[in-house]
Amino acid sequence: MSTPKKVVVFDYGFGNVRSAERALARAGADVEITRDYDKAMNADGLLVPGVGAFAACMQGLKEVRGDWIVGRRLSGGRPVMGICVGMQILFARGIEHGVQTEGLDEWPGTVEPLRADIVPHMGWNTVRASAGSPLFKGLDDDARFYFVHSYAVHKWSLEVVNPVMRAPYVHWSTHGEPFVAAVENGALSATQFHPEKSGDAGAQLLTNWIGTL
């Protein structure tokens, strides 16, 4: 019997760490909630949750060196997954109430207000997954995931110029207009929706992620 993968849910004060812990444990991981540097660096996978404001999450992450941990893990090809605002802060910048905040800049792009009749986007929605996606393997096109957000990335602009590199899998959903719902880019994965709150579909997605660690 194989040893369960060790996953750290990074606790920097922003995110539903307990629900993420329970969902990952159900998916077969050995889970710990911590902000300890060594544990976060040495885990098989690091999950970065996030709720609330972009600027507050960035400040909280930096205060516990989370920005440095994410960067160091990714530079060594160590898997990281962001959820909700934990996905948004992976982009270059976020704009909330007219104020621009610099993100982690792992991907180019700007997190902007959703342009829709009803905001926030709260509830269940489908995702248009790219073919061949490891994260969405085994999930039907009509699988629904739980979203709660008022901001999103509307344009994907990362160009892969090295033909040896695999192009990212970019997955979309629509609320008012299309927005980036999830990304898989080498060791870095992220979802705008909450897989830990998305029932069987979310459980399958987390199981798929753990299987890549």
Image (cartoon, helix red, strand yellow):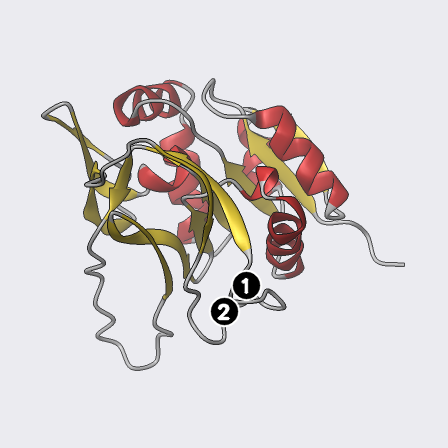
* Quarter of the view holding residue 150: top left
Q: Is residue 128 above or below residue 48?
A: below
**Badge 2 amino acid:** Ser
Asked which secondary structure carries label 1, the reply is loop
Q: Quadrant of the N terminus?
A: bottom right
How many numbered marks are there? 2
- Left or right of 144? Residue 149 is left
Outermost residue to the left? 98
Location of residue 92 in the rendering, given as x and y in whole percent from the top left corner: 21, 43
Disc 2 designates what residue? 133
1 and 2 marks in contact (CB < 8 Å) = yes
Outermost residue to the bottom? 163
**Badge 1 amino acid:** Phe
For residue 7, the mark is none
Asked which secondary structure carries label 2, the reply is loop
- The residue drawn where x is 55% and y is 26% is 16
Location of residue 38 in the rendering, given as x and y in whole percent from the top left corner: 58, 32
Disc 1 designates what residue? 136
Looking at this view, is 85 or 31 the one in front? 85
Q: Is residue 159 above or below residue 143?
A: below
Outermost residue to the front? 117
- Left or right of 85? Residue 195 is right
- The residue drawn where x is 58% and y is 43% is 198
- The residue drawn where x is 38% and y is 42% is 87
Q: Quadrant of the C terminus?
A: bottom right
- Left or right of 37? Residue 59 is left
Location of residue 46 in the rendering, given as x and y in whole percent from the top left corner: 55, 41
- Left or right of 164? Residue 115 is left
- The residue drawn where x is 45% and y is 43% is 193
Distance from disc 1 to disc 2, alpha carbons, whole Å, reads 5 Å
Badge 1 density bin: few <14, some 14–19, many ≥20, Cα 10 Å = many
